[in-house]
Amino acid sequence: MRELEERIARDGVVKAGNVLKVDAFLNHQCDVELFDHMGAEWARLFSGEAITKILTIEASGIGIACVAARHFASVPVVFAKKAQSINLDGEQYATTIYSYTKQKEYPVIVGARFLNKGDHVLIIDDFLANGCALEGLIELCRQAGAEVAGIGVAIEKVHQGGGDRLREQGFRVESLARIAAMDDETGEIAFA
C-alpha cells in the first residue's frame, strides 16, 4: 500500500535494536483516515472470505481493527487482553506470547463467549516481526475452535522471518507495507 509506505518513509524513525517507531501515526497518535484506507485495502484483499470476527491484541491493534471492521459489515472486534482483571470472568482462552518490542513474555486472554467455534476470524495487528504475537492469537482461535481466515498486518519486517514462518504453516498473511531492511545509523528504510 503506497500511502502507508510513504507515511513510514516520511514519519517513521529507525531506532537501535531493529525497532521502527511509527507512533506519530500508527500506534500512539492515530491517523484515522489512514486506518480507514488500510481497512478498505484489507477488505479488498479478503473479499472472498466470510469474516465473522476480527481479532487483535491490546493496545496498538485495537484502533486499526475497529476502523477496519467498518469495511467488513461492521463485524465485532475482539481484542486479547494482556493481563487478567476483575472484568474478565467466566471461561477464557489464554496463552503466553513474547513481545519483541517489550522484550518480555506476557499472557494474552480472550473471554470464551467472544470467540466461538465456527467463527471465521481475520486477525489484524500493527506489526509482524518474529510472529510471536500472531502465533498467540492463532492459538486462541485454535482453543476456541475458530478458523483463521487470514491475517492482516500493517507493517511486516520481512527480514525478521515471522511472516515467512506463518505462510509456511498455511496462513494467508496480507501485509500492507513490507520492510526488507532498516539502518538505525542512517535512518534508511528499504521496502520489499
Image (spheres, rainbow, N blue to C red):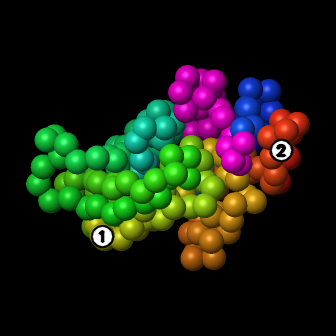
- Residue under the point 48% across and 65% down: 135
- Which residue occupies the extreme bottom position in the image? 169
Visible residue check, residue 125: no
| Location of residue 178 in the rendering, given as x and y in whole percent from the top left corner | 74, 51
Disc marking residue 143: 1
Label 1 and label 2: CA atoms lie apart by 39 Å
Q: For the N terminus, give its image quadrant.
A: top right
Disc marking residue 183: 2
- Residue under the point 74% across and 26% down: 11
* Amino acid beneath label 2: Asp
Q: Is residue 130 magenta?
A: no
Disc marking residue 18: none
- Residue under the point 75% across and 37% down: 14
Which one is in front, 115 or 130?
A: 130
Looking at the image, is 84 positioned above or below residue 15? Answer: below
* Amino acid beneath label 1: Gln
Q: For the C terminus, give its image quadrant.
A: bottom right
Looking at the image, is 14 positioned above or below residue 88? Answer: above
- Residue under the point 55% across and 32% down: 27
Structural crowding at the residue carrying mark 1, measured as other residues with C-alpha within 10 Å and reported as few (<14), some (14–19) or many (≥20): some
| Location of residue 188 in the rendering, given as x and y in whole percent from the top left corner | 86, 39
In the image, the segment drawn in magenta is: 16-43
| Location of residue 64 in the rendering, given as x and y in whole percent from the top left corner | 51, 36
Looking at the image, is 179 positioned above or below residue 21? Answer: below
Tag 1–tag 2 contact (CB < 8 Å): no
Looking at the image, is 153 positioned above or below residue 33? Answer: below
